[in-house]
């Protein structure tokens, strides 16, 4: 069309255009599949878990790593890891797989836009998604701790471990997994994000969720990279597992600070 030609003449100066062109030309059929986001998030979950799993298994043989353990000496046992792996497998067989088959059967392949988002659009979109999810999950999480029936029925399984480890991230009840999956799928649509922005958010979201539970506060943890305590990160979520009436937000710390549920790790160790 005419407008399309004009756009092509003007070109996009997005830094991401060469990458996006390469992806959409070479991997078109994979990227268009309604299964792609599922495969992307499930495989990134296992890939991101692996290094933390290695740290837990190697234990004191990797002494340098163990200095960053948030709760030293409280390392997961093989049976704890097997339990979490079992819950994750169960959820994937009975929830993720049927949902994927349904998507594959009923959702038509998506159209890949010609233009890549600008780098600024991508960053703003990812931030918008993290902030929106942070708000939604904060409310969900608060309600599931304050209302006894909700806690016992749906969220208690996630609090089986007071010293979290990577595989505990998806040690979740089915209802929690469905809620989280629903928001991470719907929010990018509400925010009208580009597919590349959506996928970047999804992968980053998987990474920070695992980091929250990894049990280590490395010098490169998000809460240390992002200044002024804006971001909660592993040390704050670890406190939530030790003192479950604090730190309900999954990502940022503003909602807990506004509503007075914020707690630092120092406070937690002082309580012991
Ligand atoms: Zn948790
Ligand atoms: Zn909780």
Image (cartoon, grey):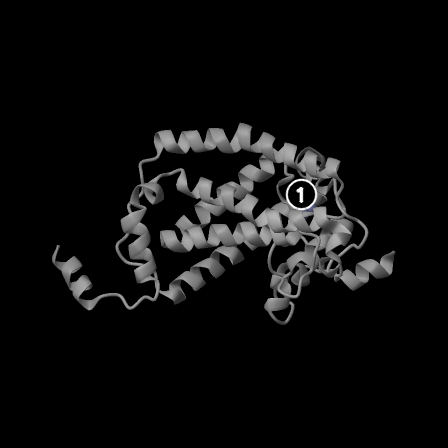
The residue located at (68%, 41%) in the rendering is: 158
The residue located at (32%, 46%) in the rendering is: 27
In percent of width and height, residue 171 lies at 65, 39
In percent of width and height, residue 199 lies at 43, 51
Residue sitting farthest toward the right: 272
Residue sitting farthest toward the left: 2
Classify 25 as above or below 265.
above
Q: Name the foreground residue: 223 vs 249.
A: 223
Residue sitting farthest toward the bottom: 228
Residue sitting farthest toward the front: 61
Q: Secondary structure at mark 1?
A: helix
In percent of width and height, residue 186 lies at 44, 45
Q: How many marks?
A: 1
In percent of width and height, residue 68 lies at 73, 60
The residue located at (30%, 50%) in the rendering is: 24
Classify 246 as above or below 57.
below
- The residue where tag 1 is placed is 168
Kindly indicate the quadrant of the structure image that contains residue 191: bottom left
Left or right: 4 in relation to 228: left
Left or right: 245 in relation to 207: right
Q: Quadrant of the C terminus?
A: bottom right
> In this view of the protein, can residue 155 be seen by the observer?
yes
The residue located at (65%, 68%) in the rendering is: 229
Q: Residues within 10 Å of mark 1 (few under 14, many from 20)?
A: many
**Is ligand 1 within 8 Å of the beta carbon of the residue shown at mark 1?**
yes
Q: Quadrant of the N terminus?
A: bottom left
> In this view of the protein, can residue 137 be seen by the observer?
no
Left or right: 245 in relation to 13: right
């Amino acid at each position: 069309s005419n407008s399309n030609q004009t756009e092509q003449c003007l070109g996009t100066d997005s830094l991401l255009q060469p990458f996006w062109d390469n992806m959409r030309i070479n991997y078109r059929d994979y990227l268009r599949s309604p299964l792609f986001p599922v495969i992307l998030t499930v495989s990134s979950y296992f890939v991101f878990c692996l290094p933390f799993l290695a740290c837990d298994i190697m234990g004191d043989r990797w002494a340098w790593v163990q200095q960053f353990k948030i709760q030293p000496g409280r390392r997961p046992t093989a049976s704890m890891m097997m339990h979490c792996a079992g819950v994750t497998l169960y959820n994937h067989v009975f929830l993720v797989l049927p949902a994927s088959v349904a998507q594959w059967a009923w959702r038509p392949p998506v159209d890949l836009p010609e233009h890549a988002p600008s780098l600024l659009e991508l960053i703003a979109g990812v931030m918008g998604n993290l902030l929106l999810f942070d708000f939604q999950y904060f409310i969900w999480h608060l309600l599931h701790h304050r209302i006894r029936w909700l806690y016992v029925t749906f969220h208690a399984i996630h609090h089986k471990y007071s010293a979290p480890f990577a595989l505990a991230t998806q040690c979740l009840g089915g209802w929690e997994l469905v809620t989280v999956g629903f928001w991470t799928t719907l929010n990018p649509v509400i925010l009208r994000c580009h597919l590349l922005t959506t996928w970047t958010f999804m992968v980053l979201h998987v990474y920070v969720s695992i980091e929250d539970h990894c049990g280590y506060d490395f010098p490169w943890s998000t809460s240390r990279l992002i200044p002024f305590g804006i971001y909660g990160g592993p040390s704050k979520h670890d406190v939530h597992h030790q003192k479950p009436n604090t730190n309900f937000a999954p990502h940022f710390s503003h909602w807990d600070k506004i509503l007075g549920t914020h707690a630092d790790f120092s406070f937690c160790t002082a309580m012991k």
